[in-house]
Amino acid sequence: MTNLLELEDVRAGYGPTSVLHGISLQVPEAGVVSLLGANGAGKTTTLRAITGGVRWTGDIRFGGRSLRGMSTEEIVRRGIAHVPEGRGICTELTVDENLRLGSYLRRDGPEVKKDYERVFEYFPVLKQRRRLSSSTLSGGEQQMLALARALLMRPRLMLLDEPSLGLAPIVVRSIFEIIKSINESRQVAVLLVEQNARLALNLSSSAYVLEVGRVAVEGDSAELQGKESVRRSYLGY
Amino acid sequence: MQEFLQLVVSGIATGGIFASLALALVLIYNAMGLVNFAQGEMAMFATFVAFTLIGRGVSFWIAFPVTLVLAFAGGILVQRVVIKPVERAPVLTLVIITLGLATLVNGLAGFAWGYVPRSFPSPFSPDSIDLAGVFVGYRDLGVIAVSGIVLLAVYVLLQHTTVGLTLRAAAHHPEASRLLGVHVSWMLALGWGLASAVGAASGMMVAPILLLEPNMMQSIIIYAFAAAVLGGIESPLGAVVGGLIVGVTINLAGAYLPFVGGDLQLAVGLAIIVGVLLLKPNGLFGRAAVRRV
């Protein structure tokens, strides 16, 4: 399988503080990859490096092309939807306006319409609340809105930063089921950052565990789950 | 009663002028979290441009839209040349820069056109119309119509177009907008262009009333601040409502409070600013700033 996203010895940081000390990872076309690790290990920074939110060295290639020197706007326009930490909902805008921000760059009108229908099938609650300010949504609904908006961008790759954060277990389960179904039916690759390692490993085919800015363990998700030493030292369950 | 209604109508006319300039302030406040102290001077400069066009024989109704376009381009230019290089600077630095810009634009206008007040033609007849006993000046009606159209155009642009949607998203949520492919930096420039054009409209409306000279907008900007603060500095609708309230209030205060007269109207504007900040800091339409940490 060819790799959609490749990171090669990526180093990045904020000002004088370096956070990533040489990360290499791959996300295959239409694959799901988990990025695990403790707080401060560099998971969010890795995602931010991919979409140009932080300066980096090394190389990041998407669809075979290096993203070096590209602005965030250019990178996401190439087909990466990044649902950031805190979900990135524009709370000043209505639910509908947030969704339109997902699709406004697309020129394939009829397909956009179909995608709206699909999105509302996944998340019927968003259809009911279309006209409301997105600040009135609950945490789970905001996560749904963020996912829906990302879907409307019709990406080839979705970067999801802790989609389970702060949500009730039952909401988390349904959101993960939707992520799975999006991946399977739409062939969208997913790079998933999660605190909840068990949940993430069940969804992904391979995984990387970061420890203070380096890849400590990598491998097949099922295998990692099987190794008790890995589970105990890095995954915390 | 008639006199009262007449004062209210002319108050609405001046209020429309304040509203336009206040809206310009709000547009930039939303985009960068600070008040552009040069807004009034930029509007004055644009008005001089219109003055020059009219002096060369161009009719007012051609000079007006041409000036709006030039002011729009000028606003974008100012953002790109003056503001963008320092956009990550602390707020206080930016405030000083806009104050410097105000002085610079004021000086340039003085250099180019001099400090002698000039009369600026009004496109409307000086006559009045009798509406059920209330005499309403055509000039007041004209100013109300023009500012109404300008404000409505901005509303439609912001609320009902894709550009407006991305403009609002970029202003309030730059990071999230970038991740959606919005060219945030250009949206901010567009915001400056829009603010500059709206401000220019207020300048061209007020010049026939006040006489045109480089310091013309310095009292108007105070009223516009009062309007923006009263409406809630982040709310475009608030700026418009605030502008109308301030316009009517100072007109009535000037007529009915003997100690205010014409001299202390500006003090009424300042009193509104202080009063709002003391009693309702978020203004009429502003939301309390809540930040989740």
Image (cartoon, rainbow, N blue to C red):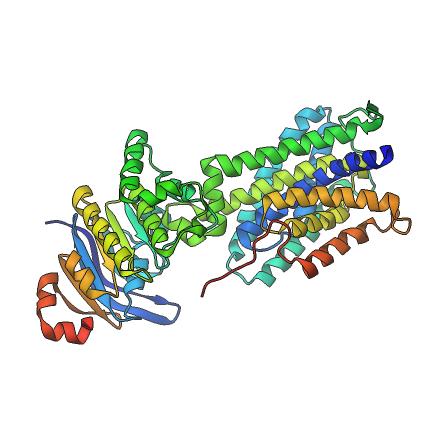
Which sits in the foreground, B259 or B147?
B259
| Left or right: residue B12 compared with residue B35 | right
Q: Residue at x 57, y 40 (%)?
A: B194
The answer to whether residue A119 of the structure is visible from this angle is yes
Q: Residue furthest right?
A: B258
Q: Is residue A26 above or below residue A134?
A: below
Q: Is residue A89 above or below residue B141?
A: below
State which quarter of the image contains the C terminus of chain A: bottom left
Which sits in the foreground, B21 or A186?
A186
| Left or right: residue A95 compared with residue A218 | right
Q: Residue at x 16, y 75 (%)?
A: A232
| x, y percent for residue A203 | 17, 56
The answer to whether residue B111 of the structure is visible from this angle is no
| x, y percent for residue A74 | 34, 46
Which sits in the foreground, A7 or B131?
B131
Q: Residue at x 63, y 48 (%)?
A: B25
| x, y percent for residue B226 | 71, 51
